[in-house]
Image (tube, rainbow, N blue to C red):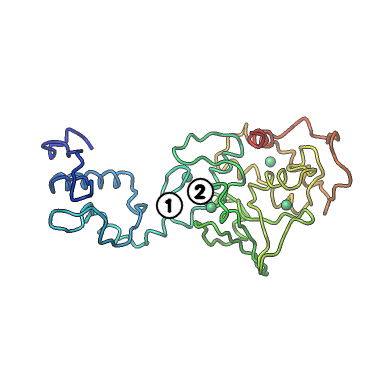
Amino acid sequence: MPPSDPSFESPPSSELTCSGSLLTWEMSDVELAVLIESLTSVVKRHGASSSLPKLMKSASFPYRDSNDALALISDDITQNLRMLKQPADQRFRCYQCGMEMDVNRVRVHVGKHILFFIRGIDEALNGIPVGLPLPCGFCGRSGIQTCAEVYLMKQKAPQARSNCRHQHKFNYAPSLVSNVSTPCTNVPIECLIPGCRAEVGSNITAVWKYNMPEHIWLCHPGYSSDGIEDGVPVPAAMARAMLITHEEEEMIGIPSDKIPPKDHLISYSNASENNIPTKPSRGKRQIRATTSSSTARHLKKHKSV
Ligand SMILES: [Zn+2]
Ligand SMILES: [Zn+2]
Ligand SMILES: [Zn+2]
Ligand SMILES: [Zn+2]
């Protein structure tokens, strides 16, 4: 809080007071009011009121004023939150950049951070950076068990789900196509390499599209993750499903020198259905081995750390 604030006669006391057997902070009602005002203005300045944690009513939580009324409550923000049409849990605050948005925008928004990471571009964000392994397509975080539970539902029109606590429903089929308003096609897709998929109830295990190259490195050594690197090409349908078009990369904002070369598309489309590695492909260089993908190098660099 600004020390020049005229409402401050003197700064709040930082002395701890002994009250019975408890050590507590004690400050005057005026100081407390100024403090709440100041905290409120910080929250408002960041547009973060809906991100405030919600606490249950508590009779013992120590913030009470001299009249024993609850203190540190901002009537202003409470009022604002009540007036907002959306309940607070319909809002999401991005773990990576801190931006607040409607939950239904989360997948497309976070997909951008993930693709930047995969392409080796440091966005220099203030939050938790995207990392390995297998960043969650909803929240962008790694290493959380519920986020790693990604499925396609077994039904005629496929729908995806994840146990990420920030998951939201989206129309699966349209989200496979990149367009200006929703450029990101990072959706759960099936790994068609024989023996990989598993049925869990009425769901089939799936992998986030942007994570598929990493999935292949982790789970299917011997296969080529991009048709450029050494290895057996993945089944053609899977190659098509995991392809990120140049248009998508451009719309998401990947600089052209970081977009993988166009010829990986050709390699993919040459892949035959249901390739199965017959022998270790070690040492066998494929045609475009010289145009080694920067993505692969980048992720492998991380993997070896
Ligand atoms: Zn973000
Ligand atoms: Zn998640
Ligand atoms: Zn797999
Ligand atoms: Zn391409």
Residue lying at 56% horizontally and 54% vertically, measured from the top left:
147
Within 8 Å of ligand 1, the CB of disc 2? yes
Q: Are marks 2 and 1 in contact (CB under 8 Å)?
A: yes
Element under label 1? strand
Which quadrant, please, contains the N terminus? top left
Q: Residue furthest right?
A: 278
Q: Which residue is mark 2?
A: 109
**Kind of residue indicated by mark 1:** Met
- The Cα atoms of the two marked residues, 2 and 1, are separated by 9 Å
Q: Position of residue 33 (x, y in %)?
A: 17, 48
Residue lying at 12% horizontally and 46% vertically, measured from the top left:
30
Which quadrant, please, contains the C terminus? top right
Query: In the picture, residue 13 is in which quadrant?
Result: top left
Residue 101 is labelled as 1
Q: Position of residue 241 (x, y in %)?
A: 70, 52
Badge 2 density bin: few <14, some 14–19, many ≥20, Cα 10 Å: many
Q: Position of residue 224 (x, y in %)?
A: 77, 42
Q: Residue furthest top?
A: 290
**Kind of residue indicated by mark 2:** His
Residue lying at 28% horizontally and 61% vertically, measured from the top left:
58
Badge 1 density bin: few <14, some 14–19, many ≥20, Cα 10 Å: some
